[in-house]
Image (tube, rainbow, N blue to C red):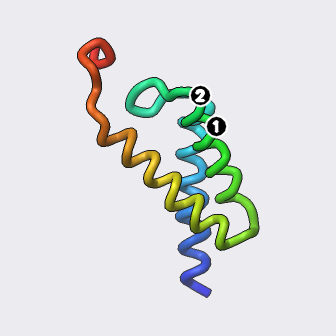
Amino acid sequence: SLGFQLFSYLALLVAMYLASSALIGFDKQALPLWERALRLLCAATLLSPVVLAGVGALALGVALAVWRRSSKLTPAEAL
């Protein structure tokens, strides 16, 4: 169905973003090890065939990205 295809494409895009930022270790600022591992786990779960786990991983991955993007930089990190 079209809805499943759209979810699959969205999951693929989010998984690529999460995996790349986790492997690089940087998003808006340097990522701690626990967040890198969680992002990589979410990306792997998004690529699995289990749809319900993918929905949860999508929500958690987007929440992590939004949280990191909305956090303020300290003056030392802004340089």
**Residue at the spot of label 1:** 37
Foreground: 55 or 34? 34
Q: Position of residue 69 (x, y in %)?
A: 35, 40
Question: In the figure, residue 11 lies in which quadrant?
Answer: bottom right
Give me the C-alpha separation between circle 2 and circle 1: 6 Å
Disc number placed over residue 46 in the picture, else none: none
Q: From the viewer's perspective, is 75 left or right of 10? A: left
Work out which residue is located at the far bottom of the displayed protein and give it: 1
Q: Position of residue 54 (x, y in %)?
A: 63, 65
Q: Is residue 2 above or below residue 56?
A: below
Specify the amino acid type for callout 1. Answer: Ala
Foreground: 42 or 6? 42
Crowding near pointer 2: few (<14 within 10 Å), some, many (20+)? few
Q: Is residue 29 above or below residue 48?
A: above
Specify the amino acid type for callout 2. Answer: Leu
| Contact flag, marks 2 and 1 (Cβ < 8 Å) | yes
Regarding mark 2 in the picture, which secondary structure is present there?
helix
Considering the image in quadrants, where does the C terminus appear? top left
Question: In the figure, residue 73 lies in which quadrant?
Answer: top left
Residue drawn at x 55%, y 55% is 13
**Residue at the spot of label 2:** 33
Regarding mark 1 in the picture, which secondary structure is present there?
helix
Q: Position of residue 24 (x, y in %)?
A: 57, 28
Question: In the figure, residue 5 lies in which quadrant?
Answer: bottom right
Crowding near pointer 1: few (<14 within 10 Å), some, many (20+)? some
